[in-house]
Image (cartoon, rainbow, N blue to C red):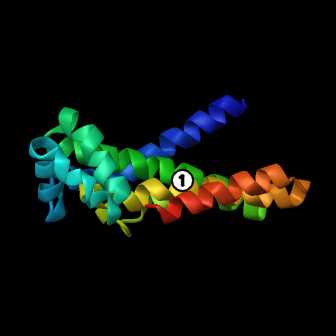
Amino acid sequence: RNIFITSSYILLICIVALIGFWQAFGFGFIADDWHQLWRALNNPNVFKIYPIWHPISALEFRWLAKWFGYNPFYWQLLGYSLRVVDALTITTLAWSLTKSKKIAAFSGLILASTVVGINSVTWANAHTSAIIIPFICIGLYVWISSNQEESLWKYLIGLLFVLLTLWG
């Protein structure tokens, strides 16, 4: 029963996010995306300096440009996937804060459906914000549970996850 409910909720998040962002799959690249792609595909040595400003974005382009190339659809599909992961981790964080399944479920659905932050879906260079959301949510979830269980280990792991978001 729990597997069915969880699977149904994940499917619902995917559908709601798709309804909210389907038109974005028709967008092209925006501003910094072109610079990042050019660097990743034509001059990877530039990345020795660039990660100082946008480390996660630089790594994302460096690793994925070979497969995604200049096709914006793949980059936007990644942004959509990140939005789904963000909604699921927000659900977990909301549950840890409130212990309410309804509030947790609605929190995830609201994030999945809202077009606030659409740039993290459509603008490949802005995926950084979508990438750090799970780290913040997981870090806070572990940190909160460490307080309830009085676990120093969990506290340090939670703190590490939250600190990793500062690198983004």
Name the residue nearer the viewer: 152 or 67: 152
Residue at the far right: name it.
Answer: 150
Image quarter in which the C terminus is found = bottom left
In the picture, measured across the screen, residue 53 lies left or right of residue 67, that is right
Q: Is residue 101 visible?
A: no
Residue 35 point in image, percent of width and height: 13, 58
Q: Quadrant of the N terminus?
A: top right
Task: Give percent across and percent down for residue 94.
Answer: 67, 61
Helix, strand or loop at mark 1: helix
Above or below, 120 relative to 59:
below
Is residue 25 shown above or below 107? above
Q: What residue sits right under mark 1 in the picture? A: 134
**Tag 1: amino acid:** Pro
Binning the other alpha carbons within 10 Å of mark 1 as few (below 14), some (14 to 19) or many (20 upward) gives many
Image point 56% across, 54% down: which residue?
135
Q: Is residue 95 left or right of residue 112?
A: right
**In the image, is residue 122 above or below residue 4?**
below
Left or right, 49 with respect to 108, comes to left
Q: Is residue 121 visible?
A: yes
